[in-house]
Amino acid sequence: MKILIFWDIYGKLWRKMLSTHLPSLRECYSPDVVIVNNENISHGKWPRLNQILWLEQQGIDIFTGGNHSLESRDDIWEYMDQPESRQLRPSNFLGDNLPGKGERVFTVNGKKILVINLIGTIFMSQSRELYSNPYQEVDRILAQYEPSSLDAIVVDFHKETTSEWYAMANFLDGRVSVLFGTHTHVQTADAEIWPEGMGFINDIGFSWAKRSIIGVDWNSVQHRFIEGRQEGLMSPDEEGPGVLSGIFVEIENQKCIKLEVIRICE
């Protein structure tokens, strides 16, 4: 099973990068599944339905999320509850009557893939009130599925610290096919296949303007760093040059046998 995974999609520039480069990436890698974390697609904020539908038109199969996933109460909440929804949000969100799911088995091109979306609790704002223990949550999820019925198990762990990330890696090696990190926005240099066959990278990296401050134009945000002032608008950087970051993995018998880092700069 071959999988392309991208994160952190941010605004119009990233959408341009995706539509430009995805066809050639498909030709190069022939993926069975394409996964995108889209929690920042609205210039650093939650996804909206029109953006999700645009991603579907580009041939994206599965969407994962993060701490912004439930901040919008528009039509995405209804979409997330639909049986055919491709949108996940972190499974260990706390609260009653939350929309959507944090894990789902998708059948794509005859392949069955279990995708699990989790969020970390270290240094996340109000994490004790918002999120349950991600290690206990992934244990609960994995216990519900018969591994022999699946072609791959993929986990998006949306976290703040490398320590929590490596803890999850040790916890899941040999139990899942791929564990990839999101939220810290910088592509890390630790991509590898772990001893028990789990593909691993601490953070896939961003997909937006290369010189931006997490997608934001420097001129509109510099006062926060230089003068310590928090007021003022933060404008997205839509001019580029752009960066498209991701990974390609190949899974055989639920083990990762190939992992390649993708970073395209314009």
Image: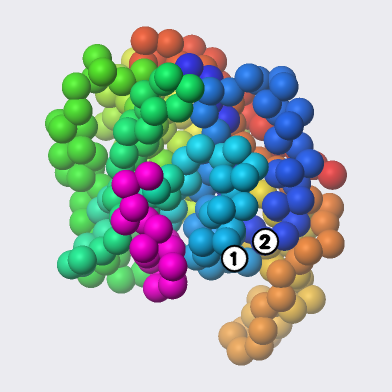
Relative image position of residue 157 (x, y in whole percent)? 39, 44
Main secondary structure of the magenta stretch: loop
Residue 169 in view of the camera: no
Point 20% across, 66% down: residue: 97
In the rendered structure, the answer to whether residue 202 lies left or right of residue 26 reads: left
- The answer to whether residue 180 is seen in the rendering is yes
Picture coordinates of residue 26 (x, y %)? 68, 26
Amino acid type of the residue tagged 1 in the rendering: Ser
Q: Around disc 1, counting alpha carbons within 10 Å, would you say few (fewer than 14), some (14 to 19), or many (20 or more)?
A: some
Residue that carries the numbered disc 2 in the rendered image: 11
Q: Secondary structure at mark 1?
A: loop
Indicate whether 50 appears above or below 15.
below
Name the residue rendered at 31%, 39% in the picture: 104
Q: In this image, 61 relative to 206: left or right?
A: left
Confirm or deny contact between disc 1 and disc 2 (CB under 8 A).
Answer: yes
Instruction: Please tell me whether mark 2 sits on a helix, a strand or a loop.
Output: helix
Say how many tags the image has. Answer: 2
Which residue corresponds to mark 1? 42
Q: Which residues are magenta?
A: 69-84
